[in-house]
Image (tube, rainbow, N blue to C red):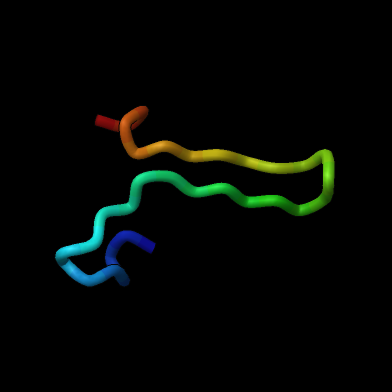
Amino acid sequence: IKAQLPSNIMLHSLFLRETPNSFAEWFAEDNE
């Protein structure tokens, strides 16, 4: 995803939800 963004856009966080009880969260600051 990050590679597809324009250079002036930074990915801060990502939230994926499959069902009401199944989800994943990702934060860029956790990977610095």
- Residue at the far right in the pictured view: 20
Residue 23 location, quadrant: top right
> Would residue 10 appear left or right of 16 to someone viewing this image?
left
Q: Is residue 18 above or below residue 3?
A: above
Q: Quick one: quadrant of the C terminus?
A: top left
Q: Is residue 16 left or right of residue 14?
A: right
In the rendered view, tell whether residue 3 sits above or below residue 18.
below
Residue 5, image x, y percentages: 29, 68
Please tell me whether residue 6 is drawn above or below residue 19 in the rendered image.
below
- Percent of width and height locating residue 22: 77, 42
Q: Residue 25: x and y, percent?
A: 56, 39
Q: Residue at x 34, y 39 (%)?
A: 28
Q: What percent of the width, then of the height, locates residue 24?
A: 62, 41
* Residue in the picture at 22% in, 71% down: 6
Q: Residue at x 31, y 31 (%)?
A: 29
| Left or right for 6, reference 19 | left
* In this rendering, position of residue 6 left or right of residue 12: left
Quadrant where the image shows the N terminus: bottom left
Q: Could you tell me how many numbered marks the image carries?
A: 0
